[in-house]
C-alpha cells in the first residue's frame, strides 16, 4: 500500500457552501444522558474549521443499534445539545424520523454561513446500512445541493454505508476531516513506512479476531509481541501445557504457521515467558482473585493464565522501549480486574515513557490507556476499534477509499 494522500478540510474552499459532514457521535448514553463526550470533542477541530471558513454545516451520524426504525433512546438530540455547548455558533437539531424530512430541509434552507444543523440518527433509516441505500445517499447529498462531503468518522470507515461511502457518488467534492487525516497518517502511513525498529504488540482474547493482523504485521514489523488470551493458543502450538487457559484449538496450526513465518522472515516473535495464573476466571470480573506466577511451560493442568507474568512484563517493556515505532492493539490480560491489569499497565507505562511514535489501535487498549491516565503520552490513540483492526490488516477501508486524492 503506498502512502495515502487524501484531500482534507484545508484543501476546500467552503465559504457560503453547504457541507455534509459524517461524524462519529456514537457516544455512550445512560438514562438519556451522555456519559462520555470524547467523540463529540474529537470532531470539534473539523467542525470549527468549517464554521470559521463560512460553511453551512450539516452533520450526520449513527448512534447505537436501533432495530425497528426510530427509537427515542437513540435520538441524536442529546449529542446536538452537547455540541451547542461546545461551539460558538448556532446549532439546530432537525428531528425527522426519516432523517432527511421537512424539519431538516427547513433548517438547512434557513441556516446562515458558519451555522450547524444536526440530523437525526442515520440508522433510523435502515437504508443507511444496506448496499441499496442509494436513495438515502442521494437525499443526504441533495440537502447540501450536491456540493461537499467531509468524512470524519473513522469508527465507521470500514462500513460501505449510505452515509459513509454511498453519498460520495452524488457530491462534487469530497475530503477527510482532521480526525480521519490523523488516523490515515498514523495507522496507515506510519505503519506502512515505519521508523525502525518497529515493534507490534497484540493482545486480546482470541487469535481468530486477529488472524490477518498477525500475518500482515509480521511482514512489516521487526518484533511481534503476543500477550493476552491469544498467547495461550501460541504456547499450546509450541507444545506447552496451558491448563484451562483460553485456547482456540482450531487455530493451533495457524499459530504454528506464524511461528514458522517469523523465523523464515527473520523476525522476533515474543510470547510470555511467565504467566499469572488462577483457579478460575474472576466472577464478578473485577472481584477478588487469588493468583500466582509460574513459567509459561509450567502451567498446572487445573489452572488458567489470566495475565502475563512479572518477567514477561519486563521483557515486553524493554522491547517496547528500544523501538522507534510501536503499534499496540489488545490488552495483556483481564485488565478490567485490578489484580490482572498489571501486564497491561506495564506495557502502557513502557509506551508512555518511550521516545517512539506510539500508536494505540482503538478498542480495549485505547480504553486501558485512557483509564490508566497515559492518554496524553501516546502519539496517537485510534477512535475506531473494528476500523483500526481492518486498517492494520492492510485492508482498504471503503470510507477512505471513496475520498478524492489531492
Image (cartoon, helix red, strand yellow):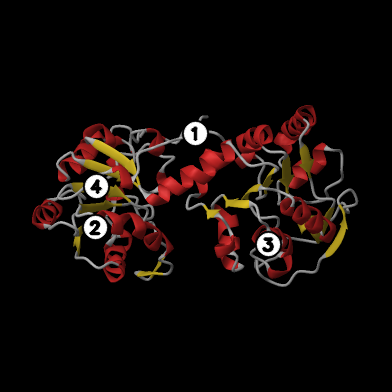
Q: Secondary structure at mark 1?
A: loop
360 to the left or right of 173: right
161 or 195, which lies in front? 195
Q: How many marks?
A: 4
| Label at residue 353 | 3
N-term mark: 3 or 4: 4
Q: Determine whether, in the image, residue 211 is placed left or right of residue 94.
A: right
Whether residues under marks 2 and 3 lie with C-beta atoms below 8 angstroms apart, the answer is no
Residue denoted by label 1:
3
The circle on residue 51 is 2
Circle 4 residue: 20
Task: Give the CA distance from mark 2 to mark 1.
Answer: 30 Å
Look at the numbered disc 2 and give the secondary structure of its residue.
Answer: helix
Q: Nearer the viewer, residue 336 or 168?
A: 168
- Spot occupied by residue 12 in the image (x, y as percentages of width and height): 27, 44
Quadrant for the C terminus, please: top left
Amino acid at each position: 500500500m503506498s502512502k495515502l494522500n487524501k484531500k482534507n478540510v484545508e484543501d476546500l474552499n467552503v465559504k457560503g457552501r453547504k457541507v455534509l459532514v459524517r461524524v462519529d457521535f456514537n457516544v455512550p448514553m445512560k438514562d438519556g444522558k451522555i456519559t462520555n463526550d470524547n467523540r463529540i470533542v474529537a470532531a470539534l477541530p473539523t467542525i470549527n474549521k468549517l464554521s470559521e471558513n463560512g460553511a453551512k454545516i450539516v452533520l450526520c451520524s449513527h448512534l447505537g443499534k436501533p432495530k425497528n426504525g426510530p427509537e427515542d433512546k437513540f435520538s441524536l438530540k442529546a449529542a446536538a445539545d452537547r455540541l451547542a455547548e461546545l461551539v460558538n455558533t448556532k446549532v439546530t437539531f432537525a428531528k425527522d424520523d426519516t432523517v432527511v424530512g421537512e424539519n431538516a430541509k427547513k433548517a438547512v434552507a434557513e441556516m446562515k454561513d458558519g451555522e450547524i444543523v444536526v440530523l437525526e440518527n442515520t440508522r433510523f433509516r435502515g437504508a443507511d446500512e444496506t448496499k441499496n441505500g442509494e436513495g438515502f445517499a442521494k437525499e443526504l447529498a441533495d440537502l447540501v445541493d450536491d456540493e461537499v462531503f467531509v468524512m470524519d468518522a473513522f469508527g465507521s470507515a470500514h462500513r460501505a454505508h449510505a452515509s459513509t461511502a454511498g453519498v460520495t457518488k452524488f457530491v462534487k467534492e469530497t475530503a477527510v476531516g482532521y480526525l480521519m487525516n490523523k488516523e490515515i497518517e498514523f495507522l496507515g502511513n506510519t505503519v506502512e513506512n515505519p521508523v525502525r525498529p518497529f515493534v507490534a504488540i497484540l493482545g486480546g482474547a482470541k487469535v481468530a479476531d486477529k488472524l490477518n493482523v498477525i500475518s500482515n504485521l509480521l511482514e512489516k514489523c521487526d518484533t511481534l509481541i503476543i500477550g493476552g488470551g491469544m498467547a495461550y493458543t501460541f504456547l499450546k502450538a509450541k507444545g506447552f501445557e496451558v491448563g484451562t487457559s483460553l485456547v482456540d484449538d482450531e487455530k493451533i496450526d495457524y499459530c504454528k504457521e506464524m511461528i514458522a513465518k517469523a523465523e523464515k522472515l527473520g523476525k522476533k516473535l515474543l510470547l510470555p515467558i511467565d504467566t499469572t495464573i488462577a483457579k478460575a476466571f474472576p466472577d464478578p470480573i473485577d472481584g477478588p482473585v487469588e493468583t500466582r506466577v509460574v513459567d509459561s511451560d509450567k502451567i498446572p493442568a487445573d489452572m488458567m493464565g489470566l495475565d502475563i507474568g512479572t518477567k514477561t512484563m519486563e521483557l515486553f517493556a524493554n522491547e517496547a522501549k528500544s523501538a522507534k515505532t510501536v503499534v499496540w492493539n489488545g490488552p495483556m490480560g483481564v485488565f478490567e480486574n485490578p489484580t490482572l491489569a498489571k501486564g497491561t499497565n506495564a506495557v502502557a507505562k513502557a509506551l508512555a515513557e518511550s521516545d517512539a511514535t506510539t500508536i494505540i489501535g482503538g478498542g480495549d487498549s485505547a480504553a486501558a490507556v485512557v483509564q490508566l491516565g497515559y492518554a496524553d503520552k501516546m502519539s496517537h490513540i485510534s477512535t475506531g476499534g473494528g476500523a483500526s483492526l481492518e486498517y492494520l490488516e492492510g485492508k482498504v477501508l471503503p470510507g477512505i477509499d471513496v475520498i478524492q486524492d489531492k
